[in-house]
Each structure stands twice: as structure tokens, then as C-alpha cells.
Image (cartoon, rainbow, N blue to C red):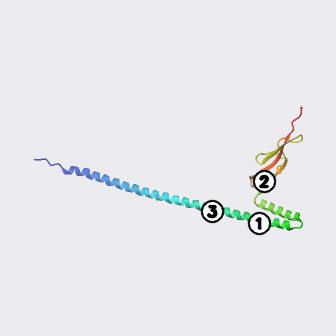
Amino acid sequence: MPTKKPTNMKKPSQDLLQNKIKKLEETIQQLKAEIQDKNNKYLRSLADYQNYQKRMEKELLCREEELKKRYLLELLDFHELLKRALEDTDSKEGLKLLISHFEKFFEKECVTYIECKGKPFDHTYHHAVSLVEKDDCIDDTVLDEVKKGYMIGDKLLRPSQVIVGKKKPLKQ
């Protein structure tokens, strides 16, 4: 009698393989869902960032326009004052008014003059345009100011252009 191969031996291993395949397919589906979720989050973040960039660019343009408008309005006032000073028969009074207006504007903007004459030369605030040797001076002292320097708050706006003194060497 021929022996019959047991069919039930193959079945458990096929069932086992089927279960493994099913679990792997479920894992693949989960991973695909996670990837899709992360991709969506990335795309939303990217869109948010791009919107933020556009908003900031727009805001900067608005600020720039507002500053431009503010300073143009100030310049219009100066322009009107210059016209008045030109029409004034006593031009000194018109110029005094204009200078006063400038000084108020600078004060409002925290622009201050750098005092330098007679003080030690400081390369942070001074730009030496000339060096003069003199008998009666202290080395590296500002003798004269060619162009005034200014600060805006605690920051340098423009350095003073100065003439610096150097003591003449003693002749032997």
C-alpha cells in the first residue's frame, strides 16, 4: 500500500507564512500612513514658513515706506523753511529759524554732537585728516575739527574729522 503524505504538515507552515505576510502587509500599511502623516506635517510647516516669509517681507516694505514717508514729511518742512528764509528780507532770521528746526529734529532723533577739540584722539570717534607737530601740545590731542562728528544714541553716526597734534621732538 502506498503511503499517503500527510497534507496537514504543509498547512501549518503555509498558515504561518500567510500570517507573517499579513503582519508584514499591516506593518507596511502603518509605515505608509506614518510617512504620509509626516509628509503632510512637513508640507504644512513649509507652507507656514513660506507664508511667514511673505508676511515679514510685506511688513518690512510697509515699515520702509512708513519711515520714508516720515522723513519726507520732515524734509518738506525743511524745504518750506528754506523757501521762507529765501523770501525773508532779513535772511539771518530765516537761517536761525531753519537751524533751530534742524536742531529740534536732531534732538528728537537722539543725534548728538561729539565734543573733541582739546581732547585725546580716539580712533573710535575721530578720523585724523592731518597731523601737526607743535611745541606747545600734548601728543595725540585733537587740535582742531575739520568736520563735526555725531552720535545717534550710543552709536557712531559719523566720526569727527580732526587735526591731531604731535609734540615736536627736542632738537639736540
**Residue under the point 77% across and 57% down:** 111
> Mark 1 = which residue?
76
**Residue under the point 56% across and 61% down:** 51
- Going from N to C along the chain, the mark reached first, 1 or 3, is 3
> Mark 3 = which residue?
59
Left or right: 14 in relation to 79: left
> Mark 2 = which residue?
150
- Going from N to C along the chain, the mark reached first, 1 or 2, is 1
Secondary structure of the residue carrying numbered label 3: helix
**Residue under the point 47% across and 59% down:** 40
Callout 2 amino acid = Tyr
Mark 2 neighbour class, 10 Å CA radius: few under 14, some 14 to 19, many 20 or more: some
Mark 3 neighbour class, 10 Å CA radius: few under 14, some 14 to 19, many 20 or more: few
Q: Quadrant of residue 54?
A: bottom right
Callout 3 amino acid = Glu
- Mark 1 or 2: in front is 1
**Contact, CB < 8 Å: mark 3 with mark 2?**
no
**Residue 148's x, y, as percent?**
81, 52
